[in-house]
Image (spheres, rainbow, N blue to C red):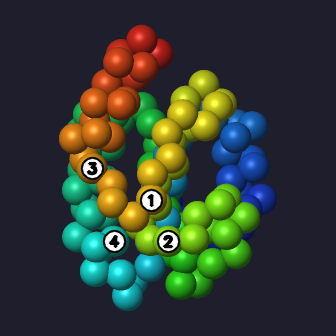
Amino acid sequence: MRIQSLNEIEKLKEQEASFCIYFSSPNCGVCQVLKPKIMSLMKDDYPKIQTYQVDTAIHPEIAAQMGFYTNPSFIVYLNGQEYLRRSRSISLQELDESLARPYKLMF
């Protein structure tokens, strides 16, 4: 799902305990290569964490207000709290290792 405003993120924080957001732009080569890998990891290994996307070419203000000034960026909320935040060089292995234990405990 695509996020169109910061207000949508605030509503997610109120309504969903756990979710993640991937910030990228279509003119970012790294973003385009990493995006399907992250989406696949989340869908296959962490299906109870809904994944959202922000196109920073269209909505740069959302990324800036969230404190992201580079692409790609990724943020995970667990139990309503920010749990993980990464920018620029995102390691899939690190992401998987960081989420495995808390995910098993929560779900």
Assess disc 2: are there few (<14), some (14-19) or many (≥20) residues with their C-alpha within 10 Å of its C-alpha.
some
Is residue 46 placed above or below 71 in the rendered structure? Answer: above
* Element type where label 2 sits in the image: loop
- Sequence-earlier tag: 4 or 1: 4
C-alpha span from label 4 to label 3: 13 Å
Query: Residue at the bottom extreme?
Result: 27
C-alpha span from label 2 to label 1: 7 Å
State the residue at coordinates (77%, 59%): 7
- Sequence-earlier tag: 3 or 2: 2
Mark 4 vs 2: CB contact within 8 A: no
Assess disc 1: are there few (<14), some (14-19) or many (≥20) residues with their C-alpha within 10 Å of its C-alpha.
some
- Sequence-earlier tag: 4 or 3: 4
State the residue at coordinates (65%, 60%): 67
Is residue 105 placed above or below 93 in the rendered structure? Answer: above
Mark 2 vs 1: CB contact within 8 A: yes
C-alpha span from label 4 to label 2: 10 Å
Q: Which of marks 4 and 3 is in front?
A: 3
Q: Depth check: give the residue in front, 68 or 48.
A: 68
C-alpha span from label 3 to label 1: 10 Å
Q: Mark 2 points at which residue?
A: 70
User: Could you tell whether 90 is left or right of 14 in the image?
Assistant: left
Mark 4 vs 3: CB contact within 8 A: no
Q: Name the residue under label 3.
A: 91
Q: Mark 4 points at which residue?
A: 31
Q: Which amino acid does label 2 sit on?
A: Thr
Is residue 39 placed above or below 44 in the rendered structure? Answer: below
Label of residue 87 in the image: 1
* Element type where label 3 sits in the image: loop
- Work out whether residue 107 can be spotted: no
C-alpha span from label 3 to label 2: 16 Å
